[in-house]
Image: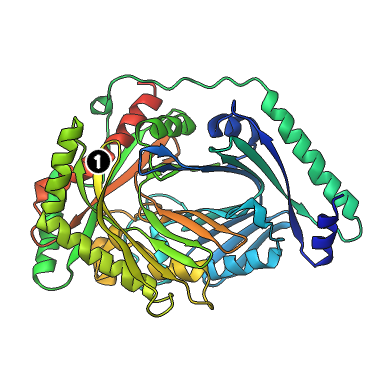
Amino acid sequence: MPERYRELAGAGYRYIPVYSETINDAETPVTTFAKLTEGAERFLLESVERGEQVGRYSFIGWDPMLTLKATGAELTVIHENGISIIQGEPLAEIKKILDSLQVAPIPELGKFYGGAVGFTGYDYVRQIEKLPTDTKTVSDLPDIYWIVPRYLARFDHVSHKITLIILSRVDPTDLDGSYGKAARKLVDLQSKFNQELSLDSISGGIKLEKDLPKVTSLSKTEFRAKVAKIKDYIAAGDAFQVVLSQRITEDFPGDPFLFYRTLRTINPSPYLFFLDFGSVQLAGSSPEVMVRLEEGMVTLKPIAGTRPRGSSVQEDEKLSRELLADEKERAEHVMLVDLGRNDVGRVCKFGSVRVTELMAVEFYSHVMHIVSTIQGELLDDYSGVDLLRAVFPAGTLSGAPKVRAMEIIEELEPTRREYYGGSVGYLGFNGDMDTCITIRTVMFKDDKAHLQVGAGIVADSQPEREYDETMHKAGALLTALARAGGR
């Protein structure tokens, strides 16, 4: 047993991350996910920066020591001794639970070596703001579903290094036994890299989405009528912008992980994720940060302003210039940057909030977006949970002013948003947090695939154009569904 393990145990930590590192350029996150993970609750987090190049790290987690699910103000905690029900503000209770684990810090493992991973649905906002509750619920999906994995694999795509991490529970009466159990498990996991693996190939055929039957929550006529209604509200002074969305549902008897593998090839994004929680899977390629916290520094990157990609570099450049010259898009973007500044300003040190990049165009497989970056320093008395509550839900998925926009959304959208417009990501044991907005995402449940897409409606919005924008955003998802569904 290493002396460091003994020292950390002596310092009172209940869990100590035990890890091994190996150089392996033959494995990918996809093959490792298939080889190592077992059971119904597991995840894969990846990144492709600005849709163009591979991000440095990927994370795989499985075998939860805790499962945390909340609906309303009731938090269900599933642990090795059974199930506990806690009444209270769910995120605050989750923070208490994570703190109580007393996991030893291992600085050389970097910004994430374990913590809570999962999704926080849009409807969690009802714990923050009072909203109408008469909207029809689509499924029994909880508002929050996070897991704390016992096992974590981290890929470093620069060094081709795979780090396997196990949370070793300290038995003060048998430290050798505690460490030995974790060390033996690491050897067992390493051996699984040698096993044979056969994965279904990804179809590279033409786009097939037009051949698929779809059920939409709003017809084109209904969507246009609701855009007109929002414009009436804006004219009356109720709001400046409201994000109207529609849900698309398809039968999907296929493999959700094959869908994810397909999506990551045709729509690489800064946040790629596959959450397999047994009865439900979320697979997404989100371009937009919800909020990030790293060593006390807060980062928010609002996206507002969209155009479809061109067929050539020259056409891309032309369309991006037109996008930046569009007064409607610029006004909408600046408004949402101001909203983001106000949100993070509630929990950041006075004078620290600043816009570090304003209105840059970023390119993705099917669309281009206007993106800005907001940063600030978190107040010393606040945590990632406080930060997430302060910015939730994203202004780019609700509107401005935020509360009135959400009330209008509740009135006009026929279903609860559930996962859509919430967040996916992690809250680390070290306090760091990285979350994306749950957009460009498909929920798989009961042999059906659900996706939701929206558009920001402002005073001079054109209903036809706004409807078309939602379908442009759905394009990569529908293409991946068609290919992965085997049709």
The percent coordinates of residue 373 (x first, y second) are 33, 60
The percent coordinates of residue 207 (x first, y second) are 27, 25
Q: Nearer the viewer, residue 411 or 306?
A: 306
What residue is shown at x 67% (from left), y 28% (from top)?
Answer: 193
Q: Quadrant of residue 428?
A: bottom right
What residue is shown at x 16% (from left), y 58% (from top)?
Answer: 330
What colour scheme governs how the chains and residues are painted in the rendered image of this protein?
rainbow
Q: Is residue 340 left or right of residue 12?
A: left
| Residue 126 seen anywhere in this rendered image of the structure | yes
Q: Is 479 situated above or below 280?
A: above
Q: Nearer the viewer, residue 118 or 85?
A: 118
State the quadrant of the C terminus: top left
Q: Is 290 situated above or below 335?
A: above
What residue is shown at x 20% (from left), y 33% (from top)?
Answer: 313
The amino acid pointed to by label 1 is Val
Residue at the limit of the structure toward the right, as seen here: 173
Total number of numbered discs in the rendering: 1
Question: Mark 1 = which residue?
Answer: 367
The percent coordinates of residue 232 (x first, y second) are 9, 65
The percent coordinates of residue 480 (x first, y second) are 35, 30
Q: Is 117 situated above or below 21?
A: below
How many residues crowd mark 1 within 10 Å: few (<14), some (14–19), many (20+)? some
Q: Is residue 70 left or right of residue 463?
A: right
| Residue 219 seen anywhere in this rendered image of the structure | no
Q: Is residue 18 left or right of residue 196?
A: right
What residue is shown at x 53% (from left), y 43% (from top)?
Answer: 57
Mark 1 falls on what kind of element?
strand
